[in-house]
Amino acid sequence: MRFISETSSDGVREQLFTLGEIPGVLWTPEGAVATRPLVLMGHGGGQHKKAPGILARARRFVTECGFGVVAVDVPAHGDRPKVEEYDRLVAENQARVEAGEDLAPLIARFQALVARRTVPEWRAVLDAVQQLEHVGAGPVGYWGVSLGCGLGVPFVAAEPRVRAAVLGLGGAPASAEAAARITVPVEFLVQWDDERVPRVQSLALFDALASAEKTLHANPGKHGEIPAFELESTLRFFARHLT
């Protein structure tokens, strides 16, 4: 793990790093020296590790909860190179949608393909970050919606260090089997008028989760219109389960 820059502002220390070919960012409280909870965040499709929604949530987790937060660029996003196979599939999917096929199953299959690469990458990132003195091997949470949900479901299912997860804006077709292996508490977000993920598929994914504690947060609006107050709920959720 190699740190390439460090800045601090308003009590938050931000460190950009690379782990092999993976570019990432770690946020911690300024002056932190001891073990603390860590939240790994998965960004949405077409976004990157410092997308506005990721950055806003990360800073709140640090300043209000004292957590560490880590995010990395998913393959073919942010500072990572293009992947020819992914570009080809995206073009094929677009053509199939224009020919009348449903978008949701195509997205789900693409996310399942990307997850086969990201799950081991994210586990390696956890290994590296938890070796740092100012993070340590504390409890881990996961936050990810849209692409971050499609990749997050198999990650949470595979990673025993994760104690709680916020997921959403995702559907069941390629995720139901992994969801059935998730038993940690989950807060699940659904946009009732989602134009990308059919409501019935989101509800099916929520139903597939094997968690004894899971809550469904359904709000009116389209895919990218999660209400601001859901951040407050996420803060309370992680504070309850990671501290």
Image: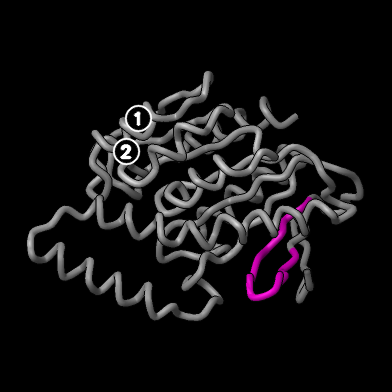
Can you say which quadrant of the picture contains the C terminus? top right
Residue drawn at x 67%, y 27% is 241
| Viewer-proximal residue among 108 and 238 | 108
Residue 218, numbered label: 1
Q: Is residue 157 left or right of residue 68?
A: left
Q: Is residue 239 visible?
A: yes
- Residue 142 in percent (x, y) is at 59, 43
Labels 2 and 1 touching (C-beta < 8 A): yes
Is-magenta flag for residue 18? yes
Residue at 45% x, 36% y is 179
Q: Does any portion of residue 11 appear in the rendered image?
A: no
Q: Residue 166 in the image: x percent, y percent?
A: 52, 37
Q: Nearer the viewer, residue 236 or 167?
A: 167
Along the viewing direction, whichever of 47 and 13 lies nearer the viewer: 47
State the residue in front, 238 or 179.
179
The amino acid beneath tag 1 is: Ala
Task: Answer with the quarter of the image where residue 125 lies.
Answer: bottom right
Q: Which residues are the magenta region? A: 15-28
Pointer 2 residue: 191
Image coordinates of residue 115 in percent, x first then y, are 48, 57
